[in-house]
Image (cartoon, helix red, strand yellow):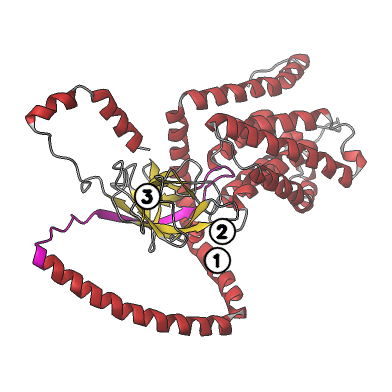
Amino acid sequence: MIRLSIPVRQALEKLSLPVLIAAAFGLMLIGKADAVLAVEVRVALADLLSPIYAVMAAPLAEVRSTTADIVTIWDIRAENARLRVENEKLRRWQAAALALEAQNQEFKSELNWMPPAAPAFTTAPVVADTGGVYARSVLLAVTPPHKVVVGEIAMDDRGVVGRVTEVGDRSARVLLITDINSRVPVTMESSGAHAIMEGTNGALPVLRYWPEGSAPVDGERVMTSAAVGAFPAGLPLGIVHYNADHVPQIYPVADLDHLSIVRLFDYGDTLVEAPDAPPGRKLMQQQQPPAAAKSVSVKAH
Amino acid sequence: MDKTPGIRPRRSWGQRLDRAARHGFPAAITIAGMILLAAPFGLPGQAQLMPAFTLAAVFFWSLFRPTSLPPPLTFLLGLLADLLGEMPLGTNVLILLLTQLLVVRSRRYLPQKGFLFVWLVFVAVAAVAALLQWGFACLMSWVIYPPIAALAQFLLTAGLYPLLAMGFTQAHRSIAAPERV
């Protein structure tokens, strides 16, 4: 330790706050200029903390289930009655679904249907709900020799949750479909028209940019579309509902508030890629490589 | 630092360790709390809780134990808050350092005015902090975020302070007091 005279030390102490405030501005500039660095630091921290959260996960789950139990005990009678009615309805639907599946199999065998390749998936626990005040994302714990890559699609047991945006050795971050920066190309079930689902940072994303004449219908289902190659077609996303301002919102089918385990699907190998164009048209295609390169980089987000 | 001059026996290792632990308590409890609050409790408004806790802790300890929370440590706390809370880097660093600057300047007279006045000052600090956070978040990603998030942040931060201050005051008088060794 260097011995300094008292006045010098006092001067240094007085100076340290303004200098650090200036450093904070510098940090902001660095964070803005080099976004990759910020992401790397964040991933490193997440890697460091994910064992702690993994240890905490078991008691946390206990606490959460206990509180949930206490809440549900109050209205268990009404819940029972509702479930009985729903069960009845579902059993009828099950019969219908089984019949339709059998019929579908039959048709497929008639038509020599070529099934798409099944995607590989990994299952990972959600260890932290690290979405900040202005971001919606979750942190997953993954064990080191993993094959999780950026761009994989996260789903829970009901539907799409989001996409993997950052991957570290022990952790991966999933940007939820409700985040304000999330854009998902979708297909609407009734019209088959495409649209974009935008996150709002609230509980419900909104639909935008549908073609004229095929506005979303209240209550219809919305699925992912393979339009830009970021998603495979047909993954369930949610149900359309118009709010009071007549904006079509999506109620996500995935239980985004209570995520505990998600599956990460790697559609990278199974996405349909267009075969090479015939020789005559190849020339035309080669004239616009920058556009093609651009579309790939858009896909990565 | 010695407040009472005089000759006394050299401190034993245990005492020195005790003093160091007491000195380190404010920063340690703040970091532990931040990490804990980023865990998935599934509480409503949990995203707002971590920055609220951090601001309240830095405000309180800068006011009552400034030697335990030197500016470089505040810088690190802010960085941790930015990384955990997914804010643009530097936002919380700046807010916490500005808070500390204000508190250190007003240390002479603020604690004598009583708890209610201190809380009132903190409410004002929380309002500015929420506004700054929102502003920087918008500016850095060039999106207008719903301002209701900033309002929720402000209300939670302002409301959390009395609760935290109760616990911190107890700690301030007992576990975080190096002069009690």
Image coords of residue A34 (percent x, y) = 46, 25
**What crowding class fits label 3: few (fewer than 14 Cα within 10 Å), some (14-19), or many (20 or more)?**
many
Secondary-structure class at tag 1:
helix
Q: Name the residue at 32% across, 43% down.
A: A230
Image coords of residue A186 (percent x, y) = 37, 49
Asked whether A44 or A250 is in front, the reply is A250
Please check the rendered image and state whether residue A125 is part of the magenta-colored stretch, yes or no.
yes
Asked whether A267 or A200 is in front, the reply is A200
For disc 2, the marked residue is B41
For disc 3, the marked residue is A186
Q: Are marks 2 and 1 in contact (CB under 8 Å)?
A: yes
Secondary-structure class at tag 3:
strand
Q: Nearer the viewer, mark 3 or mark 1?
A: 3
Answer above or below: position of A203 versus B127: below
Secondary-structure class at tag 2:
loop
Magenta residue span: A110-136
The answer to whether any part of residue B73 appears in the image is no
Q: Name the residue at 79% across, 53% down.
A: B166
- Residue type at the position of mark 2: Phe
Asked whether the residues under marks 3 and 1 belong to the same chain, the reply is: yes
Residue B69 lies left or right of residue B139; in this view the side is right
For disc 1, the marked residue is A64
Asked whether the residues under marks 2 and 1 belong to the same chain, the reply is: no
**What crowding class fits label 2: few (fewer than 14 Cα within 10 Å), some (14-19), or many (20 or more)?**
some
Which chain does tag 1 point to? A
Q: Name the residue at 87% across, 46% down.
A: B115
Q: CA distance from mark 3 to mark 1?
A: 34 Å
Image coords of residue B59 (percent x, y) = 75, 39
Q: CA distance from mark 2 to mark 1?
A: 7 Å
Please check the rendered image and state whether residue A133 is part of the magenta-colored stretch, yes or no.
yes
Asked whether A9 or A112 is in front, the reply is A112
